[in-house]
Amino acid sequence: MTDGRFVTAADNGQLTERVLTAAGAQRVRTEVLASGLFDKDQFIPLEPQPGVTPPAHGISGFTLRAWSGTRIASVSWPVLPESEKSYYKPSPARERADQLATRLLSPETWLPTDAWTTLTPRPHAVSAYRFVTVTQPVGGTPPNVTAVDWPFTTSLLDFGDPLQNPTTIPVPLGPGDFRCATIAADDARAIRTVLERAGAMVTTMFTAADFTTALATGNSGTGLVLFAEPLFPDRPSCTSAY
């Protein structure tokens, strides 16, 4: 973050933060830019080896964004388990990206102690969320939206503003009509509570702080998918890029 806070998710999904000095934050920025990956926006693809059919399954990935001096550059790439790397052509760019991600996930292994004003991780208090809904087909038998004791004056189906650029949402939602609202942490907790009381299956996606679920709307298998994720000071709105 711009104030030196270094926020990461622990193994149990809980968000924690440490605080860098100004010099420590600059050292992290130098480390990121020294990778040579942020001269432009790019996606680093996987290229299968000739005559090889990789296993068919979903692949996770990383997206890193950094201020390059004139603009924010974004780099995304898939992350492979070690056992499957032989199926794909080597990629120096992907290798550099993997190395950078490893260092950013464990900054205490390479930053000196004087790079921190607070080295011991402490809980990160989320103060705001963006709450996204999208109309799309849903499977199973989720509860209907009418079963939710919605705690706001505006109905759940109309909650939030239409989102014209859903590519800012870092989960594979849609296609469908997106809406998004910025809400306080207390409101996010209230929403989760009423969803669970209605019988919705509420799960987490990336950290213990976010949640998602689906509801039926009664329109020929179409439903409403909901996703709430923490907002940070440098990404404070529905349209902030992640």
Image (tube, rainbow, N blue to C red):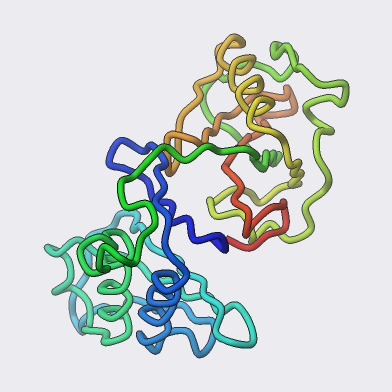
Which residue is pictured at 26% across the width and 87% down the height?
92
In the displayed structure, 56 sits above or below 122; it is below
Please tell me in which quadrant of the rendered image residue 25 appears: bottom left
The relative height of residue 125 versus residue 79 in the rendered view (above or below) is: above
Residue 17 vs residue 73: left or right? Answer: left
- Identified at 72% across, 52% down, the residue is 237
* Residue at the spot 39% in from the left edge and 70% down from the top edge: 24
Q: How far from the left and from the top, in percent, is residue 205?
A: 45, 40
- In the rendered image, which quarter is residue 161 located in? top right
Judge left or right: residue 187 versus residue 210.
right
Quadrant containing the C terminus is: bottom right
Q: How many marks?
A: 0
Q: Quadrant of residue 54?
A: bottom left
Tell which of 27 and 237 is nearer to you.
27
Observer-nearest of 208 and 213: 208
Q: Nearer the viewer, residue 104 or 164?
A: 104
Percent x, y for residue 214?
Answer: 59, 29
- In the rendering, at what x and y percent does residue 73 appear? 55, 79
Residue at x 68% of width, y 53% of height: 236
Q: Horizontal and vertical percent for residue 35? A: 35, 85
